Image (cartoon, helix red, strand yellow):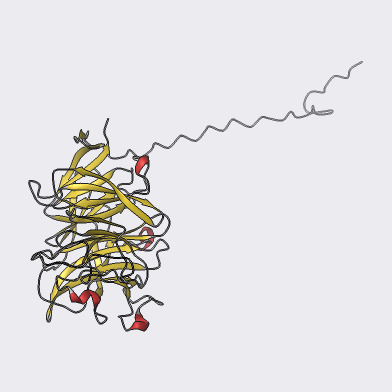
Amino acid sequence: MTAATACGGEGTAAATQPVADAPVAPAPTPTPTPGPTFPTGTPVAGTPFASAVIADFDAPWAMTFLPDRRMLVTEKAGQMLLVAADGSSRRTVATIDVDSSGQGGLMDVVLAPDFATSKRVYFSYSAAGQGGKGVVLARGTLSGNAGAEQLTAIETLYRASPLVDGDGHYSGRIAFSPDGQYLFFTNGDRQKFTPAQDKGGSLGKVLRLTPDGKAAANNPLAAQGFLPEVWSYGHRNLLGIAFDAQGNLWEQEMGPKGGDEVNLILPGRNYGWPNVSNGSNYDGSDIPDHAPGDGYEAPKVWWNPVISPGGLMIYSGDLFPQYKGDAFIGGLSSKSLVRVDLNGTNASKGDQWSLGERIREVEQGPDGAIYVLEDGGSSPGRLRRLTPAG
């Protein structure tokens, strides 16, 4: 006979059954932050690009992207602007006291490799001083809440030497080494020719500096009597410098009447100006061409007639996979975008696409689009976004 269970809590209690855990509600999928909305591009005849105008500036010179896709843009007169990714808003974050006559003004702008934590921004500009003018390397800190940022704690890091008269060939391009340990800074010959070969100055040189603007240790030419910051020499007007994915340093510079160049920059090398060039002087007098065994480093690519290069970018995005690893150069007098095929330490001419305006700057956007800043002509300075046509 089965015993009955006593009431009132008497007798043996029934076994407690386990209670199943309540199901855990899945975490909501975070709503992605919407990206910027861009205008639809218009196909550019004879090119693989569709072009959309994002913004318009007053004689812009350079630009760089922040991690949040906003842009810093420099204008020749001395304004540094923080611009929304879609160009819909902007604010002046700094006004630099520059000498903007001739080719001078506020020039390059580059983020520090550790910008995410340091908020430091590097830039270059031309300035007058005792005895003449020269290019200056400086940096500041982008401070303040979103929408109210200012460039603060601005400090001068390096001044070209010697100061000379005239308003041309400042150069002033900046590139950090891939490891972030060194800053490469271009100093033009200031239209004075011979300083590019002089040991006692920075003109006509590529410099290798620390992020604080000091001469980096173990630069290759100090033992030969050059300034300790000099990395290479014999340059004219260096308006683009960039590292490729393999760590090679590429540079482009304007030649005289003909002879624009793309160079692979190697430590301690002499690139020949003004002793040799594949162009001629503006007065028509000849300059010896580069020749094997002449002791000078020859350009990997050169143009005659000129393209008037103004900006250099090495493409690494996915929007144009066919061009990954290639160099893109802005053409000023040629009003074009120029592609150079890079293959290891070799280079060859690629395409030259007419864009109808002087191109001062070329940059790759976070989305892989190609951005160009126009300079003069019928445009005071449009920012155009290039995407694949079709």
Q: Nearer the viewer, residue 152 or 4?
A: 152
Q: If the image is split into quadrants, where does the N terminus sit? A: top right
| Residue at the outermost top position | 1
From what the image shows, is residue 368 above or below residue 213?
A: above
Q: Position of residue 251 (x, y in %)?
A: 29, 61
For this view, does 108 lie left or right of residue 333?
right
Image quadrant containing the C terminus = top left
Give the residue displayed 19% in from the left and 50% down from the top: 373
* Residue 289 percent across, percent down from the top left: 23, 65
- The answer to whether one can see residue 267 in this image is yes
Please identify the residue farthest to the right as the structure is shown: 1
Residue placed at 33% from the left, 43% from the top?
368
Instruction: Answer yes or no: is residue 160 visible.
Output: no
Along the line of sight, which residue is nearer the eye, 100 or 281?
281
Q: Residue 153: percent from the left, percent from the top?
A: 26, 69
What residue sits 13% from the left and 68% below the top?
98
Nearest the viewer among 14 and 209 is 209
**Quadrant assignment, res 94:** bottom left
